[in-house]
Amino acid sequence: MVYAPIVLFVYNRPSHTKRTVEALKNNIFAKFSNLIIYSDGPKNFIDEENVSTVRKYLSVITGFKSIAVKKQKKNIGLANSIISGVSTVIRTYGSVIVLEDDLVTSKYFLQFMNLALDKYKNKKQVISIHGYAYPFTGKNPETYFLKGADCWGWGTWKRGWDLFETNGKKLLRTIQDRKLVNEFTLQGSYDYMSMLKNQIQGNIDSWAVRWLASAIVADKLTLYPGKSLVRNIGFDKSGVHCEKSETYSVGVSKFPVHVGNIAIEENQIMKQKLITFYREHDRTSMLERSLNALLLEVRRSIEQMKGL
């Protein structure tokens, strides 16, 4: 088997980075894998200390076939870092496994990713492999396909990454012209259209929404595990786009996920589960916003009463 290189993107979170690397090092395929780390430069003098601390830790990592650290002198942002880093590595190796500094993996993550990348490398309907599984209720299949692409512990091949369109305006125009809005937003359950428009306007620095849109436009599938092999620990307000939340919280699987033979088509049951999950999350978010607004009004009333 050819083991895909792991590309890890880090910035200014020493504790998150260490947890991510230590879990990755515990993977059963770690010693066969090349680890390439991209460390973005500090945005300002405030971030310099944490970036320096992260880089000191990176210099003592062991446990992989090889380790290379690419340090940016200046800050280029997460989106530019991922796009350029993945593009560079995939041109050399032909496939890649991608992680960010807030993704803690199961010891079987690399096993699943490499076996799936090998199995589907010549299946043009499949654009990527994903390691995170949403916290759905009920029993899930061992693996399943959904249309699109995702961003929490994923892998692809050069033929898949070649479909990535960086021009958000072009993607938006294509989605609208080809009437793919319903597909892109999962029947309106998640407002990816606003997310894409915000990326175009420069309000958010998202490569992931363009990766998803590119896969939808190309009508491609991503393979998911039924049990999550990745846990996102960035929902603690430490990330650029992540507020504190438990919505996506999962435990990582203590057992391997088998890459068997399934039909290469979107699993409609799992698609409906995702739509339901997003809609329930949206209602929960609306309730939380309403409750926070009510509490704010109560506090204001109390402060006014105190002032009388």
Image (cartoon, rainbow, N blue to C red):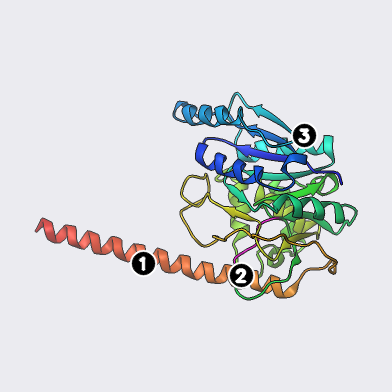
Sooner in the amino-acid sequence: mark 1 or mark 2: 2
Which one is in front, 2 or 248? 2
Most common secondary structure along the magenta stretch = loop
Residue type beneath disc 3:
Thr
Classify the position of the C terminus by image quarter: bottom left
Q: Given the image, on which type of amino acid does mark 2 rest? A: Phe
- At which x and y percent is residue 224? 72, 61
Q: Secondary structure at mark 3?
A: helix
At mark 1, the secondary structure is helix
Q: Residues within 10 Å of mark 1 (few under 14, many from 20)?
A: few
Question: In the image, which disc is placed on residue 136?
Answer: 2
Task: Choose mark 2 or mark 3, whichever is in front.
Answer: 2
Observer-side mark, 3 or 1, equals 3
Earlier residue among tags 2 and 3: 3
Give the magenta part as a residue range: 131-136
Residue at left offset 56%, top offset 39%: 18
Residue denoted by label 3:
88
Name, please, the residue furthest toward the top.
73
Disc 1 residue type? Leu
Q: Residue at x 61, y 27 (%)?
A: 59
Mark 2 packing: few (<14 Cα in 10 Å), some, or many (20+)? some
Disc ID at residue 291: 1
